[in-house]
Image (spheres, coloured by chain):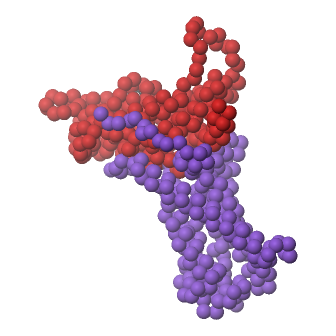
Amino acid sequence: MDLTLRVWRQAGPDRPGAFEEYRAREISEDASFLEMLDVVNERLTLEGKEPITFDHDCREGICGTCGIMINGKPHGGQKGTATCQLHMRKFGNGDVIVVEPWRAAGFPVLKDLMVNRSAFDRIIEAGGYIGVDVGSAPEANLIPVPKAVSELAMDAAACIGCGACVAACPNNAAQLFTAAKVAHLNLLPQGQPERFARVEAMVDTMERFFGSCTNHGECEAACPKSISIDFIALLNKDYVRAKRINRAMVSRA
Amino acid sequence: MTTTQAPARRQYPWPIEFYRSAVGKKWVMGVTGIVLIGYLIFHTIGNLKIYLGAEEIDSYGEALRDLGGHLVPRTSLLWLMRGGLLVCAVLHIHSAATLTATNWKARSGRYHVRDYAVASYASRSMRATGVIVVFFLLFHLADLTWGVTPAASDVYARGAIYANMIASFERIPVAILYVIANLSLAPHLYHGTWSLFQSLGWNHPRFNQWRRYAAWAVTGFVVIGNLSVPIAVQLGYFD
Ligand code: FES
C-alpha cells in the first residue's frame, strides 16, 4: 500500500518544529507502524536525508518505549495496542497519516517524535518501590495474597509507562500512570509499610510536572494496557488518607 | 539537557498543603460540589411549589426566612445557610480557577490533529458552563432576590414569590435566558456529579454504574424541573 505521512520534524529540544510530508510506498499490510517508519527512514538515509527519530525497543508491546500520536490518537487509537503492535492493515491505501510526538510540558520533545519521559522516573523514585531484606530470596508463598487482590494488583502492574495517558489527557495529567504504579504496590501486603508515604510522595512529585485530573477518561481509552480509571479513584482515596495519617506520624516523631 | 529535576518547595501546615495539591483541590471541588448539588435539588423542589399556587410557594419563602421559629433571631439560619453556600461557591470557583491555570501550564502546544475517544462535550465544557452559570446566578439574584431592575420586572415586590416569578418569566428574553442557563447547567451538573465520585475516591465495581445513573437522575430532575417553570409561564399555564 502507498501512504502519505505528515510527520513532525524538530531538530532538538528548543528548536522550532514543523510538519514534513513523506511518501511511504509499497508498504506491506503486515508491517507494524514502526516497521513502516523503518522503510521510510531507509529511503531517507539512501537519499542522504536525516531519518525520522522515534523511540522504540521491544516492539512487542511490553516495554513502553514506543508511543506516538497517530491521526490525533495516542498509539493510533486501536484499543489496548501500543504503536509497535499497530499494523498497517488498519489503514487504507492512499491514506494521509498525521504523526506527532506526545505533547506535554512534562514530556519535552528531544527530537522529532522522541520525547523525554524522565519525569516518570522522578515519580517512581519518589515511592514506586518496596523495602525488602537483602540476602537469599525469601520464600515465595510466605505471605498469602488473596486471588482477587493479586489480580487487581496485576491489572495495575500491567502499566508499561509509555506516557499515552499524559499525551491523551486534555490537562496533561499523569494520574493514570501514577495511580497504576501506586495501586500495584499499595494493594499488596508487601506494599503496606510504605503505603501512605508512597502515595503522598508520588502524587506530590507528579504534580510538579503534570496537570490535574478532571475525569475526562481519555487516558483509559488511550492506554495500551487498558488500565482502568478506577485506580485513579483509589489513588485519590489513599492520598486523602495519607495526608491525615502522615501528619499524625509526623506529630509523634 | 532538558530539566526533569523537581524544584524544591516550602512546606506548609497540612490543610494548606492539602489544598495546595491538585488532588486536594479536586477533593474540595467534590465536597463543595455535593453541597451545591444538594442546594440545587432543594431549590428545584422549592421552584416546583409554584404549581401548588401562590399561597403555597409564598409561605415556603416565609418558612425559609422564619427557619428556627422563635428559637433564633429571624432570618439568622437562612443567612447561615447562605454564608455556607457562598463559602462553598468561592472554594469551588477558586480551586477550579487555580487548577485550570495548572493544567494550562502543563500543556505544551496543541496537537495538530486530535481525535478524542471518550472525553464528552460535558467534561470538556466544564469551564465554559461554570462561567455561564456564575453570570446567570448574578442575574437571577438581581431578578428574583434583590429585585433590581432591569433584571427584575417592574412589578417586583419583596416576598411575593409567585407574582415575581410569573411577572419575570412573562418577558420573552428573560424566559429564553433561563432556558439557556439551565441548558448550560445540565452538562456541568452531569459531569460534576459523576466526577465527584472519582475525585473523592468513591469507587467500587458494585456501584460504579450507579454513579452514571445518579448523575443522570440529579441532572434530569434539576434541569427539567427548573426549565418547566419559564416554559409553563410562556405557554400561559398560570393565566
Ligand atoms: S516498543 Fe516496546 S512497547 Fe512498543
The chain displayed purple equals: B
User: Residue A22: which quarter of the image?
Assistant: top left
- Residue drawn where x is 63% and y is 61% of the image: B88
B7 displayed left or right of A44: right
- Residue drawn where x is 56% and y is 78% of the image: B139
B48 displayed left or right of B11: right
How many numbered discs sit on the rendered protein?
0
- Location of the N terminus of chain A by quadrant is top left
- Residue drawn where x is 27% and y is 33% of the image: A53
Coordinates of residue B238 in the picture (x, y in percent): 71, 87
Q: Nearer the viewer, residue B112 or B89?
A: B89
- Location of the C terminus of chain A by quadrant is top right
Task: Tell me if residue B237 comes above or below residue B181 in the rendering.
Answer: below
**Is any atom of residue B114 visible in this view?**
yes
The chain displayed red equals: A
Task: Tell me if residue B198 comes above or below residue B160 in the rendering.
Answer: above
Coordinates of residue B145 in the picture (x, y in percent): 65, 80
User: Residue A127: which quarter of the image?
Assistant: top right
Q: Residue lying at the far left in this picture: please name it.
A: A48
Task: Tell me if residue B142 comes above or below residue A93 in the rendering.
Answer: below
A77 displayed left or right of A24: right
Q: Residue lying at the far top in this picture: please name it.
A: A136
Quadrant hosting ligand 1: top left
Q: Nearer the viewer, residue B146 or A177?
A: B146
**Is any atom of residue A233 visible in this view?**
no
Task: Tell me if residue B214 comes above or below residue A80 in the rendering.
Answer: below
Coordinates of residue B223 in the picture (x, y in percent): 64, 68
Q: Residue lying at the far right in this picture: please name it.
A: B70
Coordinates of residue B113 in the picture (x, y in percent): 35, 50
- Residue drawn where x is 69% and y is 50% of the image: B210
Q: Nearer the viewer, residue B31 or B209?
A: B31
